[in-house]
Image (cartoon, rainbow, N blue to C red):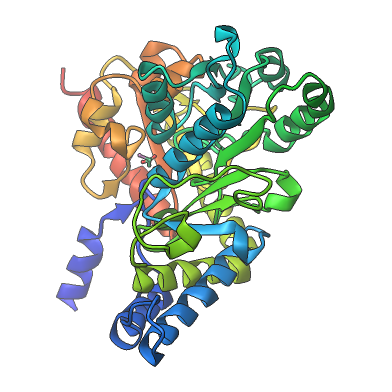
Amino acid sequence: MADAKEEIANKTVYLDYNATTPLSPSVLQIINETLRDAWGNPSSAHVSGKKAKEVINVARSRVAKMVGAREGDIIFTSGGTEANNTVFWSVVKHFNMFYKTNDSSKQLPHIITANIEHDSVTLAIENFVKEGCCEKTVVGVSSTSGMVDVDRIIEEIKPNTCLVSIMMANNESGVIQPINEIVSKIRKLQCSRDESGYPKIFVHTDAAQAIGKINVDVSELGIDYLTIVGHKFYGPRIGALFVKSPAKDTPLHPLLFGGGQERGFRPGTENTGMIAGLGEAAQLVVDNLETYSMHMRKVRDHLEKRLVESFPNQIHFNGRFATSERIPNTCNFSILGPDLQGFRVLSRLKRTQVSLGAACHSDQQFAPSRILLAMGIGNEIACNALRVSVGRETSLNDIDIVLDDLQQAVSHLQNSH
Ligand SMILES: O=C(O)CC[SeH]
């Protein structure tokens, strides 16, 4: 009995699900079973190969169903970074194949993106610019909504614009971006652009933080490219890229060259076990999204209620706006006070696993989040920020443990002078 009590007393609460999620039990099970029973090379003609190929076909169908896509529009990748980089490479290569002109002003493809994107978007585009392969325009999000201004995106369009890439939901603030509206307004421009001989403007969204939390339907969005990241929705660390009619309606050029796998769009012997796991994770989303979403919202809202009760007049929510929506699991907040920088509070937490912001920026813990600064949040408040992202299994009791931990940490820091 003592052991059980001790275990409860020492339990730590993981609330960093936007960084990564554990595998769902059925995902782990199907991965194990596939590695054990369907290890053949999917390209082999014999029965072992056919068995592996069938596993991949089923997984592709499940992933496609999760995002409302046709199976042929899903290409498996190693993850979100590869998927994002493939989009930029494809549109740049397509532009150079069909729109390269003698007029240097139109010589380079132009990409529009936002100032809150994940590094696999921001740095990939920056590299293309440094290499002299494209031009970019980075639009800022509004400080009153955390969303990009759609009309501003439209204003930034130029004759050589060929891609708009805006994430579906931000990993730190949780704010959902107006993808439908962006696509709709861009499509209205296309006729006149066609008449002028200007390139089609494709639209890409990195849906890493949206899938498994809110409904994601490529038909409803009208999107051309959509990035899927398994380890954000209790799946394995691989990903997929949705491309609307690849190489027909929408450019798709491989980053890699080798065998003919994935119809030549993504060569390399397939990671059958992980693909099976991605398919299972997708099926769980198809079957349970509403339940997942409602539960995470209930727990996140309880957290926010408890924060205000525990720290009256001392909490600033960094992603909560009257004019925008957030994914249901994310809460970014600052506890105001001169000694309460996020890294200090984090160092005093004994039972809570949260982050200051994106995991890939965790080496910059003493600097305020670039995402929060980009949203117009002041330096002092941004320095005190903590990012909490709850999961499917997070309980109200977990939140109470975290609030107790936070209160003790803050009390210690405020009384340490
Ligand atoms: O936001 C996160 O932690 C995942 C992206 Se690096």
Q: Quadrant of the N terminus?
A: bottom left
| Vertical comparison of 329 with 39: above or below | above
- As rendered, which of 385 and 88 lies closer to the eye? 88
Q: Residue at x 35, y 47 (%)?
A: 402
Q: Quadrant of the C terminus?
A: top left
Residue 79's x, y, as percent? Answer: 39, 51
Residue 50 in view, yes or no: yes
Q: Residue at x 75, y 32 (%)?
A: 181
Is 32 situated left or right of 103 in this image? left
- As rendered, which of 134 and 240 lies closer to the eye? 134
- As rendered, which of 343 and 254 lies closer to the eye? 254
| Vertical comparison of 109 with 307: above or below | above
Residue 174's x, y, as percent? Answer: 52, 37
Is 200 situated left or right of 43 in this image? right
How many labels were placed on the picture? 0
Q: Residue at x 53, y 77 (%)?
A: 58
Q: Furthest residue to the bottom?
A: 47
- Ligand 1 rendered quadrant: top left
- As rendered, which of 348 and 290 lies closer to the eye? 290
Residue 32's x, y, as percent? Answer: 31, 80
| Vertical comparison of 336 with 88: above or below | above
Residue 149 location, quadrant: top right
Residue 375's x, y, as percent? Answer: 51, 19
Q: Furthest residue to the front?
A: 102
Q: Residue at x 49, y 70 (%)?
A: 279
Residue 307 in view, yes or no: no
| Vertical comparison of 230 with 279: above or below | above
